Amino acid sequence: MAPHIGRRLRKGAATTAVAAVVMAALTASQAPGLAGTAREDRHHDSAAGETPAPPAADTPIDGGSSYHTDLPPLRKPGKPGTSIDLPGLPDDAAAAEAGIPATVLDAYKKAESALKESKPGCNLPWQLLAAIGKVESGQAGGGRVDAEGTTYKPILGPVLNGNGFARITDTDGGAYDGDTTHDRAVGPMQFIPSTWATWGRDGNGDGERNPNNIYDAALAAGAYLCAGGRDLSVKADLDEAILGYNRSREYLATVLSWLEYYKKGTHEVPDGTGVLPDPDKNSGGSDGGGGGGGSESPRPLPDPTEPGGDHSPTPEPPTTGDGGTETPSPETPSPETPSPETPSPETPAPATVARLKAVGVTKLTATAGEQFADKPRVRAETAAGKPVAGVRVQFEIRGETDARFPWFATRASVITGSDGTATAPVLRAGETTGSFTVRVTVVDRTATATDFAATVKARPVPQADALARTDDKDLKAETGGSFADAVGVKATYKGKAAAGVPVTATMIVDDAAKATDKPTENDKGPYFKDAKGKTVRTLTTLKTDALGKLVLPKIYTDDHAGTFLLRLTTADGTTLTIELSVTEPAAQPTDPPTAEPTDQPSAEPTSTPTAQ
């Protein structure tokens, strides 16, 4: 079992400054570039019940829940004097930490492969999924999964009731987490139910989306990490994707450390034999065999690259006699630590949202199969009209429609920005035409819902200004038979092939064809057959192909002879009339009677005497 560096640092560092220096050494040796990345500090202080601010159009996956803080085995750097006081590990322990359970490893690699096709610009490495899986659930509790990748029992994070974590009231009726009052992070990748409702995927092809299945969860996590057009080969995008899981700098540093560690080499181990996280950091935090972390989400250490370091509302800890600081244990909170219900003086309670005000276009329109040009956008405001930042709002598609947000989702949650606004992800129309509603509500708060009216219009009907036959053969057949040659036509519009043009084919009465543009269907003569073999003389489901061409189904004849007319008509009124000639079968010549053969004895052959 690996030494647990994260725990030792928190308990053993003499001062906050020393802890910062040690963490800097860790990130420098195992996650290059992290310490030098100066980014806006958007730390999610779960104890204060704040809602993390994820990237636009994204929703935090684990709700700011707990996680495992074990760090990978340290590799002694080559530069003399660097990390010299940090402990190392024996080779066998390091090898054990590099082992990933077979089914779990397969799920990560399959998710990477799938996203290479669906999100080729994302550049998601499977080692990132492994790093997050390690931190969130200890690789599904050491690989305790069945052959299909489903955990033997649910992996549940702590109750998200605001006591040490974010407060998220129940969103799934207890379907995933068994809790009908509050949500809990679920599964090997620790999705909160509301996030799973949007991002859940079927990674193993069984027709279900199960957060407790590692194939489903890994693919869903990968989809989330790739959201918003991120390129994970870019450091800023990578950091932002990881922070979307849990807005903690320590979380970021821990995941990056495991990412770098796994990139340097891993191997497959049997399911159920993976290294389990430190139980000291998993007490009371989750159920289900090594799941979602410890009893309290660890607070990030200060960022050594920014003045002032960590900006969370944690008060200064009491000082010890030697001038250092005393870190209270999770079981004995410091008296100065404010309770979740009592925000610290530095962080006022979030303003109450009195209303959600639509911003910009309120009526959305799109053509079937196309993207809506406008996105629903709202502004969260107080009763005085001031913006409210950091509020999670949900956009939900309601009504009879197959319009969807990305990844076929019907709901999407977005955090309001500093100006109080939140914009929905791209909305794409399906093939169902008509009206529906996009309803916007504040998650976990009382506010009037705002509705956007959306309409999907039918695709424009392709036009054709000319129809012509593709050959000039005479179309002839005999009664009681069928035409040997198929009828082929081509539609054009302004001289170019007209694809997808609907065409109606009707056997019409001759006199009516000359007298009106709406001829009468004939009740005799040539006919088509429908799918059941029934006689029909009008077809309405015909359409030209990509080259503007159309070949009619086989045409049959009844016992009526004569000249008949076939009328082809497009939706915009272009017509083509074709003559069909039907004749009686030609008379067959009568053969003269043949005489009955008589049996005549055949002449006996004469034998020729041979010369003696």
Image: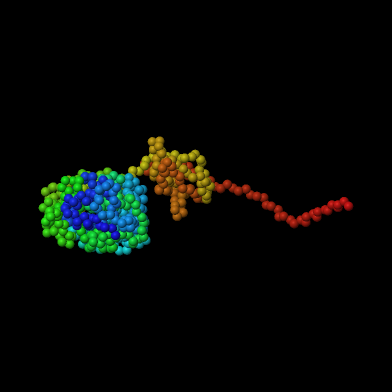
Q: Is residue 600 left or right of residue 520?
A: right
Relative vertical location of residue 145 with respect to residue 456 in this rendering, above or below: below
Quarter of the image for residue 465 reads: top left
How many discs appear? Answer: 0
Q: Is residue 539 visible?
A: yes
Residue at 28% x, 61% y is 290
Q: Which of the pair 503/390 is nearer the observer? A: 390
Q: Position of residue 200 (x, y in %)?
A: 30, 55
Q: In the orientation shown, which residue stands out farthest toward the front? A: 80
Q: Position of residue 595 (x, y in %)?
A: 70, 53
Q: In the orientation shown, which residue stands out farthest toward the top? A: 495
Q: Is residue 440 left or right of residue 607?
A: left
Residue at 62% x, 48% y is 589
Q: Position of residue 512 (x, y in %)?
A: 42, 43
Q: Which of the pair 277/599 is nearer the observer? A: 277
Q: Is residue 167 visible?
A: no
Residue at 26% x, 45% y is 33
Q: How was this image coloured?
A: rainbow
Task: Work out which quarter of the rendered image holds the N terminus and state it.
Answer: bottom left
Q: Position of residue 258 (x, y in %)?
A: 29, 52
Residue at 49% x, 45% y is 486
